[in-house]
Image: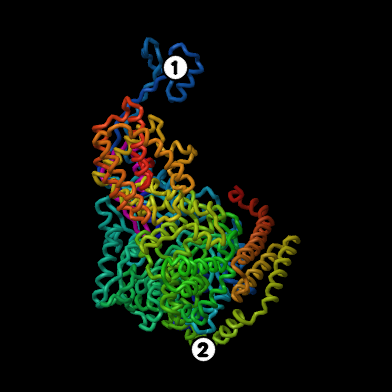
Amino acid sequence: MSDFLLELRSEEIPARMQAGARAELEKLFRREMDAAGVTTGEITVWSTPRRLALIARGLPEATEAVSEELKGPPVGAPDQAIDGFCRKAGVDKASLETRDVKGRATYFAVKNVPGRATKNLLAEAIPAIIRDFSWPKSMRWGAASISTESLRWVRPLSGIVALLGDDVVECEVHGVTSGSVTLGHRFHHSGDITIGNADDYAMKLRAGHVIVDHEERQDLIRSGASRVASDAGLKLVEDEGLVIENAGLTEWPVPLLGRFEEDFLEVPPETIQLTARVNQKYFVCEDDKGELANAFICTANIEAEDGGARVVDGNRKVLAARLSDARFFWDVDRKKTLAQHAKGLERITFHEKLGTVADKVDRVAKLADWLVFDAKAPNGDHKLARQAAELSKADLVTEMVGEFPELQGLMGGYYAKAEGLPAEVSEAIRDHYKPVGANDEVPTAPTTVAVSLADKLDNLLSFFKIDILPTGSKDPFALRRAALGYLRLVQANNLKLSLDTVIHAWDGRPNTDLAEKLADFLLDRLAVQLRDEGVRHDYIQASRNWQGRPDMRVDRVEARARALADFLGTEDGANLLAGYKRAANILKKEDWHGAEGEIARTGEEDPLALVDDPDMKAVVEAKMAERHAKELSYDFEPAEKALMDALGKAEPAAAKAIESEDFSGAMAALASLRAPIDRFFDEVTVNADEENKRAHRLDLLADFRAAVHKVADFSRIEG
Amino acid sequence: MDRNPRKSFQDMILALHDFWSANGCLILQPYDMRMGAGTFHTATTLRALGPEPWNAAFVQPCRRPTDGRYGENPNRLQHYYQYQVILKPSPANIQDLYLESLRVIGIDPLKHDIRFVEDDWESPTLGAWGLGWEVWCDGMEVTQFTYFQQMGGFDCKPVAGELTYGLERLAMYIQGVDNVYDLDFNGRGVTYGDVFLENEKQMSKWNFEVADTDALFDLFNKAEAECRNALANEVPIAAYEQAIEASHIFNLLQARGVISVQERASYMGRVRDLARGSCEAYMEKEAPVWAEKYPEWSK
């Protein structure tokens, strides 16, 4: 058993590619070893900016011999077939063996593959790994690149160390020859380092000022940054992405703390943090009040002779230059009002079919005004909502957002505040993109809610109107996110918005198709959102119609679906559902439609829709009276009577509760039917011999089903 | 006379000239046209095409109208110098050569933190891209280091290594000054500000506020037409010069803020067509000679 070490040295590998490269190296190595039949023990993969390393423990000295049998054509087959088989199997005709297969003499080629030295297998595997290695971006280099067939690597590949035990695995890849020699830190170590074997590799590199284990470097950065911050009486703002990136940029990481001029703190702290992180890969710190401090932490790749004083000073200057840029943007942007900036939106296309961003802003402003003034959702000042909406996108044309697009909204808020606009307006501008992620906070300030809702509705409606909907994983205009944002705003603020009136206001005319398209989309997102809370999508389906039409109030569908989920989670609910299904099955089997079914077989999904029709009311009552007159001519069994009485109470109670959108009240009314329906099924024979009894009992079940349907369409509930 | 690259901007340039000259580079002079980057110099763009070995170094003044700050920003300029080195094919020790050049101008990598940070380069205008790094010295980008992979839409065969030093930044670093205008230009008290501050003020004003935009639009169209004229008459180098001109006029129009977002893409497309057309014509003209001399290349 021997351990194998492979080091692929190259010019600096981009930090963001190193994790992927480690996985790729391990994957390809395993693939090669599997194909060669070499069993491997534990595999460790490391990376630095200048090398990828793999250590595989416990490789055998050689693979075992294998005997392989290939079945060929039967004896007596045409020569062509036999020759072809020999060619394919790579054996001589003379060496074929004959065996009996189901009574037929058949040729077999027996190949004895001898065991091979692992070292030789590795010598073949290494070039294959390098050749097949997949990088996000790769390049050619040097004199060999006169041909485009030359080797591609992430950056020029400069050396290979390959050792099995203490021996070099000899191979060559496009002019790079394997050996046992590597290089240490670019500046702290000069000359070659000769590696003995897998065991002394990390140690020898450490002596050459290289910490080859990326996780160890990450730990050093984490703890070092935290320590230099606390030494300065500050607290590190943790940033795992920066830890990993800096570990990918250094072989010998040394976190150093520096200070920048306090004056820079006058620009918004988010811009400082972003500049430091994105442009310079610095950590930032907070003071004991949790406010951004005038300090940064850079991660040097050297143990500087002067303790890093020059390095820190240099980095301070760079940051100062960056911050003076930020301050320049901050100053220049504030020379114009947001209203002046907003003029620039006339030059920016929102979407080729949807006009400019200025056009969009007009629509959003109109809708935000309407939401507050007409729909009272939310309560607030409609003029402020309009003003905030009109300015909401102005920061897109400012210098600062041009430099840092991530700051959209936030900068608009700062600029609004700086020019003295009302706090409601500046906050609405700042927060109107919210909620962005699933854990993002949801606005509740009325002006913000209005602008945020209007912005999301406008995105959804604008794109739906030109038939752009997300497909599969493609959602280039983030419409799913907009829909989720809409739902969360409605939920957090208890808004009761009817989509058809919203669309009327947005489009200037009713548009049922668009309203239903939007409702469908929102309910799909609602189903996804509520799934984790145990509110199943079929509960939403069961709740989506209101008075016979698709419910245009998503909040109401949700409330009903939630109440339904709660109810079905109780014993009463589960039993009632069972009772409902039994009743529905009987009615289906008997093709019994009840009184309402007799009145009009309209083909509508829900015949009850017509019962609410005032024109039909007299007819229904007359029919019912006629039927009851016939049916009432026998004595009811107690369980039958009990169900009739219970229905007589529960039905109006449920209807009343539904009317006032008290869905748990409606469910409670249904719950009162559970015992009577159970007892009815226990004690009463529905299919009685007497036709009048049978008709009455079926009608009773139909009434029961109708009462349940008043609350929710239980026929949509699965399972 | 002794040179002191640590105290004099011009000595720093001369030290780089000495170094790269000693390492086999032709020392060329700046291209006599306004351009956004040293890469536009024909010694880079056109010479990156084809199989002929080519090693050259030169200073190129660069114009970035939108970077003007009226002389008020300590390190942003609408006119500054790049030092360009082009090595074709890229030598195996190119990183070592580069680091050695830093030592020559007084940067000790054991006192300063030198880092190669991923920064791929792409110029849609030139139909060019390459992989490489920005080289950081204590967090400051001092050099762009690129292995050209394509130029003018053609594969670079062989690949050239391009080094672009930001001379002012490097000098500020080495001289330890915070403001570009405080750089010592000659080691005898003449500052960078003495030479360029007034230029920056006036040129920023002209770039942002004064330049006659109608005239600029006109110039753009004329350069475009002249480029086509040159192409039609098979003088690709002359055509390429007009592409450089159009590119700079476009930058000026951008600084004047008269090109809308939608128009921007169309203007960039026009410049790209000129630059690519010139490169293509240059290739076409030279390819037979190259193919004969380097059979390997034509494959």
Q: CA distance from mark 1 to mark 2?
A: 94 Å
Q: Quadrant of residue A586?
A: top left
Amino acid type for the residue under numbered disc 1: Pro
Label 2: element kind? loop
Position of A82 with respect to A631 (left or right) is: right
Q: Where residue A655 sits in the image (x, y, percent)?
A: 36, 50
The one nearer the camera, B151 or A163, is B151
Circle 2 chain: B
Residue A623, placed above or below residue A658:
above
Q: Amino acid at mark 2?
A: Val
Q: Residue at x 50, y 87 (%)?
A: B191
Residue A298, above or below A117: below
Q: Image point 32% across, 63% down: which residue?
A: A240
- Labelled disc at residue B190: 2
Residue A322 at what x, y percent from top left?
A: 43, 76
Residue furthest to the bottom? B189
* Along the line of sight, the residue nearer the viewer: A286 or A688: A688
- The reply to whether the C-beta atoms of the residues labelled 1 and 2 are less than 8 Å apart is no
Q: Quadrant of residue A624?
A: top left
- Residue A8 in the image: x percent, y percent? 37, 52
Q: Which residue is mark 1?
A: A73
Q: Is residue B137 visible?
A: no
**Residue A402 in magenta stretch:** no
Q: Which is nearer the eye, A105 or A464?
A: A464
Q: Chain of mark 1?
A: A
Residue A312 shows in this picture:
yes
Q: Position of residue B279 (x, y in %)?
A: 64, 60
- Give the magenta range: A25-53
Q: Magenta includes A51? A: yes
Picture disc at residue A156? none
